[in-house]
Image (tube, rainbow, N blue to C red):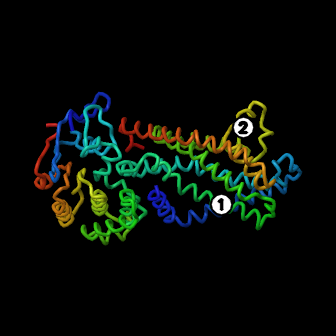
């Protein structure tokens, strides 16, 4: 697994300007929401899960969204790249377990997402006036790790979909976008229509956003969300790994491992 | 292997095949395009599940993790590398998948680079290498982890005379290493003790 993560790091480093621009994009992204928040003031902390302003609220949303995206969409994208470059077959002939392959492909995107999330929070604090003075950083770390574990299951499952149907970009993007939208990345889920509320109540990202905002803005009350995320991870990860193995077997059976 | 066969729908890509290979034995797979040479190699490598029959690498069923530890493969070599990385980095990455220690992976990578005279290729990014150069790295990759069986698909295609000589010399230095070599070149068959004609 470490070999695959190191490989991805080496490839990513070879695109050094892309990496720099990616982090710069994070700052620009944050500035857009900063000015939206300044233009549309007025929401109260009670409406924003304890966040003192819409900008503070959405900063956490953005930070978590990149982690969601890395744990879900980017793993599927990595599988797709292996298909397109023809290296998937070379990997599968190695003595590497399907689970090592899945975790290995998700490893670097997840680590980079944590860096990007840290950039969001640092820039928001240092330059744009968001205060995390009362934050429970232990709680933040616990919820973040639980979020990664819970969503990695989804990412591996999406990777399995890509293995089988190849061009699944739309499915992956839709899933990632819906998770952010329904979980409350950009606005409180209470503003969603009534018929969407039951779905919003159970999407894993909802627990991630609620837990992280609770840890950062109120300094407590994140424990239930962390427990829910951990439960999703305990059920979802083995299921996703089973799906990934089945997808690899499907490719071996149909001879489509080398197809793209 | 016993009765190993592979179909793609109505097409019988590989007719039922019985075959046993002893340690150190080299088998040249011959036959026209589409006769099933690559299909057979893929079934043994575990990237294709046979439609019927069975194949074993040592005492392990082909395709299992234990079987994959025992074999090295060079299939579709020109596409199966990370071209933005150097030959050395590519070899190291695959070596790490076959060795539990990073030091051991590095040691074997350097030994193979020296043995196969790959110093120049090892230092270059593979997108700056010719097809033949990449092919040589693919052969080196197949030797990582000291396999007992090599599966080589057209291993000498695009290679110059010196590189071909180095390839066979490397196999000669490994008297216990069995190899199945799919090739159209008569020279390759001459370097193998046995021949199997597919699609005949």
Q: Which residue is mark 2?
A: A200
The disc, 1 or 2, on the residue closer to the chain's N-terminal end is: 1
Please tell me in which quadrant of the rendered image residue A256 appears: top left
SS of the residue under disc 1: helix
Which residue was labeled with disc 1?
Answer: A25
Chain for numbered disc 2:
A
Does residue A86 appear in this view?
no
| Residue at left offset 33%, top offset 47% | B66
Q: CA distance from mark 1 to mark 2?
A: 28 Å
* Apparent side of residue B101 relative to residue B148 in the rendered image (left or right): right
Image quadrant holding the C terminus of chain A, namely top left
Q: Residue at x 41, y 36 (%)?
A: A250
Q: Does residue A54 sit above or below A206 in this rendering?
A: below
| Position of residue A196 measured from the top left corner of the image (x, y, whole percent) | 73, 33
Q: Residue furthest top?
A: B10
Q: Please, what secondary structure does the residue beneath circle 2 have?
A: helix
* Chain of the residue on which disc 1 is drawn: A
Picture quadrant of residue B36: top left
- State yes or no: discs 1 and 2 in contact (Cβ < 8 Å): no
């Amino acid at each position: 697994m470490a070999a695959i993560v190191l490989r991805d790091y080496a490839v990513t480093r070879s695109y050094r300007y892309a990496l720099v621009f990616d982090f710069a994009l994070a700052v620009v992204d944050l500035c857009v929401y900063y000015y939206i928040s300044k233009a549309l003031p007025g929401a109260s902390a009670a409406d924003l899960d304890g966040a003192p302003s819409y900008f503070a609220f959405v900063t956490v949303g953005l930070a978590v969204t990149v982690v969601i995206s890395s744990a879900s969409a980017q793993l599927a994208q990595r599988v797709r790249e292996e298909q397109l470059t023809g290296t998937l077959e070379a990997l599968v002939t190695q003595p590497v377990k399907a689970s090592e392959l899945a975790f290995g492909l998700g490893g670097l995107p997840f680590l980079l997402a944590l860096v990007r999330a840290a950039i969001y929070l640092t820039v928001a604090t240092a330059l744009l006036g968001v205060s995390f003075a009362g934050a429970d950083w232990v709680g933040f770390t616990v919820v973040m790790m639980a979020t990664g574990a819970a969503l990695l299951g989804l990412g591996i499952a999406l990777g399995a979909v890509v293995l089988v149907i190849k061009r699944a970009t739309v499915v992956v993007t839709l899933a990632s976008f819906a998770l952010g939208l329904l979980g409350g990345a950009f606005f409180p889920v209470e503003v969603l229509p009534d018929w969407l509320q039951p779905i919003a109540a159970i999407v894993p990202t909802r627990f991630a956003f609620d837990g992280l905002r609770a840890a950062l803005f109120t300094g407590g009350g994140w424990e239930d969300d962390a427990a829910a995320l951990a439960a999703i991870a305990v059920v979802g990860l083995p299921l996703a790994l089973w799906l990934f193995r089945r997808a690899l077997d499907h490719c071996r059976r149909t001879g489509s491992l080398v197809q793209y | 292997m016993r009765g190993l066969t592979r179909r793609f729908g109505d097409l019988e890509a590989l007719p039922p095949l019985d075959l046993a290979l002893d340690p150190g034995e080299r088998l040249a797979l011959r036959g026209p395009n589409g006769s099933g040479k690559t299909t057979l190699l893929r079934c043994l490598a575990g990237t294709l599940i046979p439609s019927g029959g069975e194949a074993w690498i040592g005492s392990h069923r082909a395709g299992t993790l234990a079987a994959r530890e025992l074999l090295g493969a060079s299939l579709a070599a020109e596409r199966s590398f990370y071209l933005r990385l150097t030959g050395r980095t590519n070899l190291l990455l695959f070596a790490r998948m076959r060795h539990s220690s990073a030091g051991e992976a590095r040691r074997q990578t350097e030994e193979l680079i020296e043995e196969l005279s790959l110093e120049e290729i090892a230092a270059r990014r593979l997108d700056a290498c010719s097809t033949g150069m990449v092919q040589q790295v693919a052969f080196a990759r197949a030797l990582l982890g000291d396999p007992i069986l090599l599966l080589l698909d057209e291993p000498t295609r695009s290679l110059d005379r010196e590189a071909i000589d180095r390839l066979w010399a490397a196999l000669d230095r490994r008297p216990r290493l069995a190899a199945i070599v799919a090739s159209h070149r008569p020279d390759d068959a001459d370097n193998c003790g046995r021949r199997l004609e597919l699609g005949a």
